[in-house]
Each structure stands twice: as structure tokens, then as C-alpha cells.
Image (cartoon, rainbow, N blue to C red):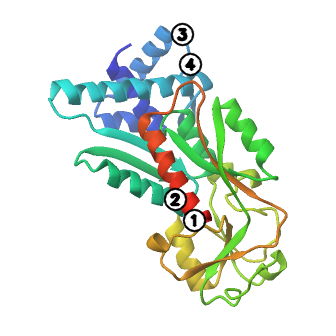
Amino acid sequence: MTLQQLKYMIAIAECGSITSAAEKLLIAQPSLSKSVSELEKEMGITIFYRNNRGVYLSEEGSKFLAHARQVIEQADLLEQQYKHREKVRRVFSISAQHYAFVVNAFVALVKEYGKNKYEFTLRESRTHDIIEDVRTSRSELGVLFLSKFNREVILRIVQNAELKFTPLFTATPHVFVSRENPLAKRELVTLEDLKAFPRLTYEQGINNSFYFAEELHSTEESPMNIVVTDRATLFNLLIGLDGYTISSGILSSDLNGTNIVSIPLASDEMMEIGYIYPTDRPLSPISERYLEHLKIYIEAYLS
């Protein structure tokens, strides 16, 4: 097993195809296929399954790739420290559902780090992908929510991925609407009130189960529905189309302006927002520091 082979495996997993990975790596496709076969034989596992669309990771392959990423990252750090005589860049990555407080804490962490060389990654992603990112060590932490409706399913998936969920806080359901929306001045809205307006939800890809939805009451009927992939688009549509979305109620005027307001929703649900991380290794110091920033921001908002 060589570092080059590990880099090959990572490239194939990211491309989803040996042919595409070969083009990206500028090597011949037969050579890359041979490297995969030799590594699988040496390790005694099947790393990739093949289908007519390319390749995908086996269960053993996913675990192998998680370790491979760690090896490659450590090798890169060693090269930067000793081969090139440069100071090691601090690396940190987090995947999360679409929450402003996650971004606020990330901004605080980057500002605190204050160096001119670093590599931080923030992924606002789909629920299933967040779990996968942490499971495969693509991200150190993941932030998502549990409710009465999704708790059993999400916790089972998290536990099967050898991850742990730790609560941060519990929020009552709110709706985000434009300041010009007819509901904006209400002290409380109901699900029935919302049926007159377009419902905005985040797209969950092929894992589009109600249990993976970022919004509470995902099984409620709505005559008008719009699915989006990013927070900026959702907020623009809240304003432009008088739409609504159901969330935790925490807004950031620094990041999102003052055109969106949060209104309590009459509901028997709750949102327990927390973070997931691998159970087989301790959190890194920078992950611990990020969580401190996250808790500081949340406590300031809730106080």
C-alpha cells in the first residue's frame, strides 16, 4: 500500500467513476483500475462496487476511505512542516444543516485563528450527507436536529455510523417570513394559516425521506411547495414570493439582514439541535474551540 494508491482511492470516490478519476489524475484508466485491484487484493477487501454509472463505495470501502483520508492529511501536514519548511496550516471542517448560528460561530473561529495560512471548510449540506461527511472523516463535526418525528430514525442511523449525537439546545418551532408578509405582525401562527403561502424547504437529494427533512411538519399537506438547495435562495424567495419556512427561530441580522422575521408556530413539536462526531476518537482542539464559540453564540441569543 502506498500514499499514491490512497490518493487514487480518494479521487475515485469523489468522482464516482474510475474513468473520470483517471482523467482528473492524468493517468491511464487501465493503470488506475489495476491500482484499485492490487490494493483490494492486498487489503483483502472490496473497496468499490461497479455499476453501469461508475463505482460506489462498499461498507468496508467507506471505513477504509475514512482512514485513508486521515493518512493523506497527516502526510500533507508532514510535507508542509519538514519538506517545504512552511508552518503547518490549521485544518478544520464542519458539515451542517442551514443554520445562521453555525456560520456565526465559524466566522468567530476563523477570526480568532488569525493566521494567513489555514484551510477551513464549512458545508451547508443535506441531512444524509452530513452524517456521511462525519462518518468518512470528510468533516470533524456535523450539526443537525432531532424531533419527536425523526428522532428514532436519525439516532439509529447515527449510531450505526459509529457516531454520537450531543445536544446543544432545544428550540420551539418558528416560521421565517418576509417583513412584508401578511403574517409578519402576528404573535403566533398555525399550520392552517400557512396553507395560503408557498412552503420553502431544503432539497434532500436521493435520500428525500420525510425523516431527513430540515423542517418540522414535513408530512403536512401544502398546496404550494418550492424546494431549494441554499439558504440565500430560500431567503430571497421568502421575500420575493411571500413564502415561509419552518425553523428554529434563530436569525442573524449580521448575516441575513433585517428583511426576515421569526414568528412562533403553534406546534407540539420541538427541535433538539446538536452535533455529531465519531465515537472512536476524541475531538481535536480546534473542534472543541469551535463548539465553545457555538455555545457562546447560542447562549447570547437565548438569554
Q: Position of residue 27 (x, y in %)?
A: 29, 29
Identify the residue under disc 4. 46
The disc placed on residue 186 is: none
Closer to the chain start, of discs 2 and 4, is: 4
Horizontal side of residue 135 vs 173, given as left or right: left
Q: Residues within 10 Å of mark 3 (few under 14, many from 20)?
A: few
Q: Looking at the image, tell me whether mark 3 or mark 2 is earlier in sequence order.
A: 3
* Nearer to us: label 1 or label 3: 1
Q: Position of residue 60 (x, y in %)?
A: 59, 21
What residue is pinned by disc 2? Answer: 297
Label 3 to label 2: alpha-carbon separation: 48 Å
Q: Which residue bears the numbered disc 3?
A: 44
Mark nearer the N terminus (4 vs 1): 4
Mark 3 lies on a secondary structure that is loop
Residue 181 visible in rendering:
yes
What residue is shown at x 21% (from left), y 28% (from top)?
Answer: 81
Tell me the mark number nearer the camera, choosing from 4 and 1. 1
The quadrant of the image that shows the C terminus is: bottom right
Q: Amino acid at mark 3?
A: Gly
> Mark 2 near mark 1, Cβ–Cβ under 8 Å?
yes
Query: Which residue type carries mark 4?
Result: Thr
Along the line of sight, the residue nearer the viewer: 56 or 64: 64
- Residue furthest toward the front? 303
Cα–Cα span, label 4 and label 3: 7 Å
Read off the residue under disc 1. Answer: 301
How many residues crowd mark 4 within 10 Å: few (<14), some (14–19), many (20+)? some
